[in-house]
Amino acid sequence: MKRLLAFLSVFLTCSLVHAQVRGLPDFSELAEKQGPAVVNISTTTQVARGNQTTPFPFDENDPAFEFFKRFIPRPPGGGAPRGFENKSLGSGFIVSNDGYILTNAHVVDGADEVTVRLTDKREFKARMVGADKRTDVALIKIDAAGLPAVKLGDPGQLKVGEWVVAIGSPFGFDNSVTAGIVSAKGRSLPQENYVPFIQTDVAINPGNSGGPLFNMRGEVVGINSQIYSRSGGYMGVSFAIPIDVAMDVQSQLRAAGKVSRGRLGVVIQEVSKDLAESLGLAKPMGAVVNSVEKGGPADRAGIEPGDVILRFDGKQINTSADLPRMVGATRPGTRSTVQLWRKGTTRDVAVVVGEMVDEKAAGSRPGQGGKVPEQAANRLGLVVSELTAEQKRELKMASGLVIEHVRGTGSRADLRPGDVIIAVISKGATTEVKSVDQFNKLLAQFDKGSNVTLLIRRGEMQTFVTIKGLNGN
């Protein structure tokens, strides 16, 4: 009996250890098979003598600075030599056996020379096929054949919590392997409207940019592009461009050397809970249209400021960030269906998608300036005045109220002197503002504590602002 119990004890212990070992991922086979398709990319840029104080590609607060300081001597006196070469490092991966390589646009941006080094130590001069700064994807080409290429996966099948692996050249250390999990999907980043980023906690550092992110089947699901950091080094929050987005970009770059994107010609914003209530929506969703470009695709389709775009070509718009991605991925000239929420009902309109062009810089805010007039603020805590004839001509507006000063309740909202109030929105209805007296009468209809949503113009942009908790004046 004692022998039996001892045997069972050993058996259970071994089983537990085996289960624990089996539960931990082993990345060795993935690294061995996929590593040869990952390359080191170094760039050289000729920099004219100017105000530069260091020839290093990183500033002194960057973790890479100490590393590069050992290998790149500083000129006497700390100044930059005349015509010095600025060198930087990154990563990339081979997507076809004949030498096409994907990397980040910022890795090769402005480079005079791009050198690709393989794991077998062969080096090639690469030529630029094309780059797209909006997605931070670049395609380069080396003259070689029979190269190992990566397998492509489906980022749509990724699950939050799933293991992923990055291979790259952090700080120039070739073919370094780091691992982590998917932290989130479909992340929107500031100024990055066209990429639903994959967030991971994989260690990414300078030099990893442009390298592949693999799933556990050894398939590339993303391109490591950015990190969130307060120090310049890895802090556990990394972002990768989904490979399907990158491959769509590279196919256009290979075919035409540039990327064409669709556009509607609207300015949009997120639908908050308060704004949804003002517009009569059951829940916050979609993208509310602040303004419509005159003569643009949306204008020709009959889309108006105050409309909420709920669907594009049958795909639901959950957040405003979804719309630029969907429209941008649509080829110019495509006839698409847009579902709108307008005055409490839904309607479908057909729109012919235009082509994305460079955005124009926003103009300055209108305003009278000078001393703030000594007059009482209204229920919103705003001192307003009607637009002068000159302002109407300048803004090409028939009516509106310019905000001269913001007090009390209004100071809690995102309202500024110089903003022009265009309309008041309540229960899905939009009422154009034409005079101070009419505006105050509209405000008088709201109960104390109500929320009021205004459509305002700021510079050349229009936006919705909700003021919470109307006072009882």
Image (spheres, helix red, strand yellow):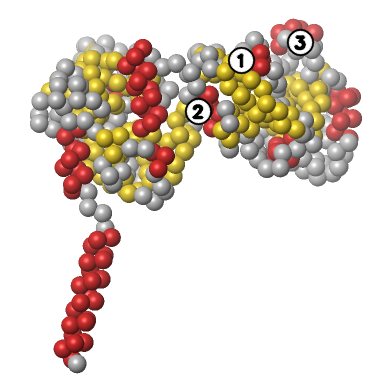
Q: Measure the alpha-carbon separation of dots 3 and 2.
A: 35 Å
Residue under label 3: 392
Residue 249 in view here? yes
Which residue is at 18% across, 82% downward? Answer: 7
Q: Earlier in the sequence, mark 3 or mark 1?
A: 1
Residue 60 in view here? no
| Relative image position of residue 207 (x, y in whole percent) | 25, 32
Residue under label 2: 325
Q: Type of residue at label 3?
A: Lys
Q: Type of residue at label 1?
A: Pro
Q: Type of residue at label 2?
A: Arg
Of the pair 266 and 34, the residue shown nearer to us: 34
Residue 109: which quarter of the image?
A: top left
Residue 196: which quarter of the image?
A: top left
Q: Is residue 60 above or below residue 202?
A: above
State left or right for residue 34 relative to residue 458: left
Residue 321: which quarter of the image?
A: top right
State left or right for residue 50 relative to residue 189: left
| Relative image position of residue 430 (x, y in whole percent) | 79, 28
Which residue is at 22% across, 52% downward? Answer: 26
Q: Are marks 3 and 2 in contact (CB under 8 Å)?
A: no
Mark number displayed over residue 297? 1
State left or right for residue 218 relative to residue 273: left
